[in-house]
Image (cartoon, helix red, strand yellow):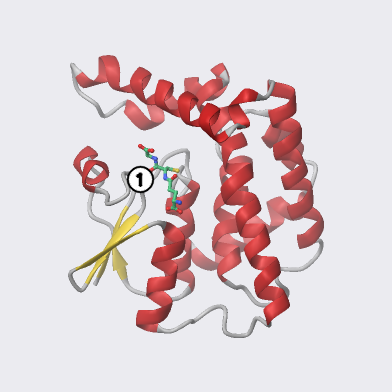
Amino acid sequence: MIKLFQFAPAFGLPNASPFCMKLETYLRMAELPFEVPQATLQQLQRAPLGKMPYIEDEGKVVADSTLIIDYLKSAYGDRLDGWLDETQRATALAFQRLMEEDLYWAVVYTRWVEPQGWEKMRPAFFAQLSAPLKWFVPGLARRGLIKELHGHGMGRHSRDEIMAIGNRDTTALANFLGDKPYFMGSQPCSLDATAYAFIANILCAPVESGLKHHATQYPQLQAYCERMRNRYYA
Ligand SMILES: N[C@@H](CCC(=O)N[C@@H](CS)C(=O)NCC(=O)O)C(=O)O
């Protein structure tokens, strides 16, 4: 059975990490049986790329949500994307990159930099730590994320610019989804695993932010999250 190593659920979501939630959603959508060992700090330390999620399957360890999905497709068949033509695949990839390489960093900013986000992140992620770890790990992690934001480039912008960049992504997602039930049409595909993970992490997490405020203007995004939750997490 596939072992999925990821953070423990938080914020009333399957996962507060959009990458972990994307992979769990993919596994559910593809109806691949999996188990989630209880999350520990050691798992993150053992993660091949130092990030979650990763999987272990038949003695093989695979990291990175996209590479894991590629592995699952080659090991168990492409159960979700076979019907997409080349143009649809290109569009799906572009939207995936928009969320993972751009919107993600705006989300990180709202959670790790903005005080109202950090107020929610700290207890959700670090409450289980015992002394002395709980005294320095949260601050260390926060400083690490701020450094990563700066390295990426997003962190060099003002707060208003970061919100404008992220909100433009959300508007593109909302307009492309329109009144379709799923991102590529009437049938779900693996892009929906990514889209649900990112949109729910903005709209449904208890972090009040400019991103969330903007996303609430699009009722189709809320309806989409409910549709995905009811279908795959009922
Ligand atoms: N490209 C990776 C990104 C994974 C990622 O950024 N995971 C974050 C959580 S959202 C993480 O594990 N961060 C822990 C750390 O950097 O120490 C994927 O698709 O899996």
Three-letter code for the amino acid on which mark 1 is drawn: Lys
Which residue lies at the image location 60% right of the left edge and 32% below the top edge?
A: 153
Q: Is residue 174 above or below residue 29?
A: above
Q: Residue at horizontal 24%, vertical 72%?
A: 1
Q: Determine the secondary structure under disc 1.
A: loop
| Above or below, comparing residue 28 to residue 75 in the picture | above
Q: What residue is rendered at 74% in x and 27% in y?
A: 161
Report crowding for label 1: few under 14, some 14 to 19, many 20 or more residues within 10 A (C-alpha): some
Q: Position of residue 94 (x, y in %)?
A: 67, 60
Q: Is residue 18 above or below residue 125?
A: below
Q: Position of residue 97 (x, y in %)?
A: 61, 55
Using the rendered view, name the quadrant where residue 63 is placed.
Answer: bottom left
Q: Position of residue 107 (x, y in %)?
A: 58, 36
Residue 143 left/right relative to 128: right
Q: Is residue 185 above or below residue 12?
A: below
Which one is nearer the viewer's eye here, 35 or 161? Answer: 161
- Is residue 213 or residue 168 the one in the foreground? 168
The residue wearing badge 1 is: 51
